[in-house]
Image (cartoon, helix red, strand yellow):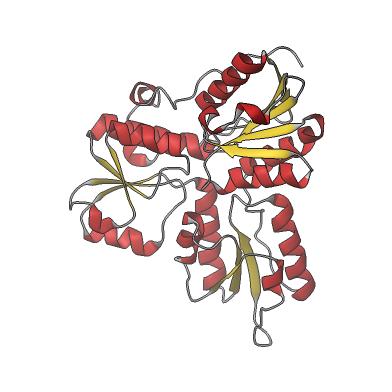
Amino acid sequence: MRIILAAPRGFCAGVNMAIDSLSLALKAFGAPIYVYHEIVHNQYVVRTFRDQGAVFVDSLDEVPEGSTLLFSAHGVSPAIRDEARNRRLNAIDATCPLVTKVHLEAIRFAKDGYKILLIGHAGHDEVIGTLGEAPEAIVLVEDEAAVATLEFPPGTRLAYLTQTTLSVDDAGRIIAALRQRFPEITCPPKEDICYATQNRQEAVRELTDAADVVIVLGSQNSSNSQRLRELAAERGRRAYLVDGPQDLDQADFKPDMTVLITAGASAPESVVRETVDWLIEHFDATVTTQTIREEKVSFPLPKPLRNFSPADSSSASPAISPQAQVQSEPA
């Protein structure tokens, strides 16, 4: 068996920042640290932090007044921020800056009198937060079919924004449909789909043809991980989205296969290593890395945590802290 490791894969800058933030908060303030929704959409990461004293909540009613609260990487609405202040919570904002960018664009377009068409998935934490910035001005558009149903009074100024973790191809088709239907629609100054989402999709697009099967490491509720699986499937390959090797069936693989492995932006490298080790154990696999694009992006910690060293976070969460990549043979 031959394993191709796609690069880039796994943690993006926003996830690294959010994970460092929670690790440092646990070290600085002690458990429990409350987190509004999952810190990132990965069950391995959530379970690891829960074991260390993080408490993940879906309502601020679950958070005792005066407690420390972390906002997840996906962002929150202004109403949640207001509620946190009213409950005298020590709020630490670990929202990914690329999500914050979309929030600020929504605020600006709404103030300028635009009706905003937000391309995204209903119920996703990021979309809920963005909708909350200007609920009267935003209409959610989930697919091309929805574009045909949109009706606005003559003279309505329109703009579109996108969820950061969408499929580049799917978003492109929806944007093309919007532009065809509403030629005067305004776009954001810079596209909203994040660099990491685009890079991981590009790697799958470039490398899938050389593989018999594709394994995407990530959780089922991870939007960007689902897009990677869908992209591989669209290119005619069997594709599995799994949290780790415990979710794989040995009967689905054969010794002469080439297996492409990638990981969503919230999946830790440790589960990539475990999956590679599982395939080596069962199929005597060899490993090569194919790098499509280099990433050197980093984001600063939230202000309340900047007096602490990011290196301190590794001792709090060794299983999910940045680690050496899987060793491979030259491509």
Instruction: Compare residues 33 and 103 and report the one nearer the observer.
Output: 33
Instruction: Compare residues 272 and 152 and report the one nearer the observer.
Output: 272
Image quarter hosting the C terminus: top right
- Counting from the top left corner in percent of width and height, residue 169 is at 74, 52
- Counting from the top left corner in percent of width and height, residue 170 is at 71, 56
Give the answer, above or below, for where 267 lies relative to 164: above
Q: Residue 55 lies in what quarter of the image?
A: top left
Q: Looking at the image, which residue is at 65% across and 74% down? A: 158
- Counting from the top left corner in percent of width and height, residue 129 is at 45, 59
Give the answer, above or below, for where 152 lies relative to 81: below
Left or right: 254 in relation to 129 = right
Whether residue 286 is visible here, answered yes or no, is: yes
Instruction: Compare residues 112 and 297 and report the one nearer the observer.
Output: 297
Give the answer, above or below, for where 296 lies relative to 177: above
Q: Looking at the image, which residue is at 67% across and 72% down? A: 146
Q: Looking at the image, which residue is at 24% across and 54% down? A: 62
Left or right: 137 in relation to 174 = left
Image quarter hosting the N terminus: top right
Q: Looking at the image, which residue is at 53% across and 45% down? A: 220
Q: Residue 287 lies in what quarter of the image?
A: top right
